[in-house]
Image (tube, grey):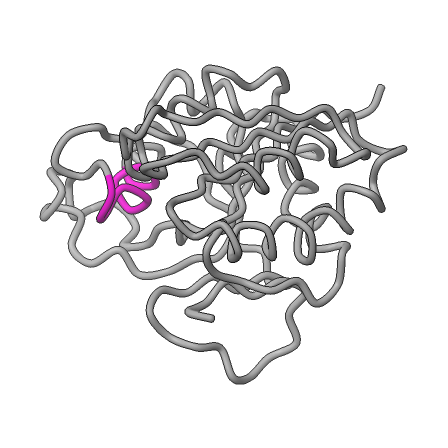
Amino acid sequence: MKPGVTVVMVAYDNEDRALTRLMRDLMPSLLLYRSALDAELLVVDNSAKPQPRLAEAVRENGVVPAKYLWNEGRNLYYGPALNLAVKAAAHPFLLYVCANHGRMVDPTWLWDLLAPLVNDTTGKVALTGTHAPSGPPSKLGFPNSLPHLHIQGGLFAARTGVLAQHPFPDGEYAHWNSDVYQSLQLLQRGYRLVDVPTVKSVWRSRVTQGHYKFIHDEG
């Protein structure tokens, strides 16, 4: 039985960037694994107005079943938009790709993110991606005895059911620190966050060294 994955992008007011990320950085990987994965594509659009070229590219991608969901001009921000995607997802695994930043170098990056989840027999691997420091967990209401790390937002894979049971924050941390909060709450509940060395996700900096298959950075 093929692993099932819902691939998610959250767009916001930059159609050209979203199209680049979709067609240049994501679709080659979905095409490569079309026979190995049961995949669907879901684009949640937080933009003030619908983005018609993006919507058409999503619906007519020719590789996987896909949906374009415009939030009628409401910016749900990062966490709530991902919660919406989780509710709409049809598959046990979810893979998120930032619509604004990043570049694919090797299309096999997609499987590198999914493999730790697919191969996990314990059900304890909840998130995969790039480990990054969290700062003191107490700043977000968690005990400082937790590991001071998180899976950096922008590029990650997860168990859909775990995200449904433990949603992203929708209040104070709906955008900034949402990825940190999510990682800490999963760590607190005994889940594992797996670092994938072939992908690199950073925030407000540019990766200049290392051999990576996908880089999520400022460009």
In screen coordinates, is 195 left or right of 163? right
In screen coordinates, is 214 left or right of 73? right
Q: Give the magenta range.
A: 175-184
Q: Residue at x 49, y 50 (%)?
A: 15
Relative to 108, residue 178 above or below: above
Predominant SS along the magenta part: helix
Magenta residue check for 125: no
Q: Residue at x 49, y 77 (%)?
A: 207
Quarter of the rendering containing residue 202 = bottom left
Residue 181, position in %: x, y?
25, 40
Residue 128, position in %: x, y?
53, 45
Of the pair 170 and 180, the residue shown nearer to us: 170
Of the pair 7 and 54, the residue shown nearer to us: 54
Residue 88, position in %: x, y?
51, 16
Residue furthest out toward the bottom? 208
Magenta residue check for 183: yes
Tell how many labels.
0
Q: Residue at x 28, y 34 (%)?
A: 75
State the quadrant of the N terminus.
Answer: top right
Of the pair 99 and 59, the residue shown nearer to us: 59
Q: Residue at x 22, y 28 (%)?
A: 170
In screen coordinates, is 87 left or right of 212? left
Relative to 88, residue 6 above or below: below
Of the pair 26 and 178, the residue shown nearer to us: 26
Residue 67, position in %: x, y?
60, 24
Residue furthest out toward the right? 35
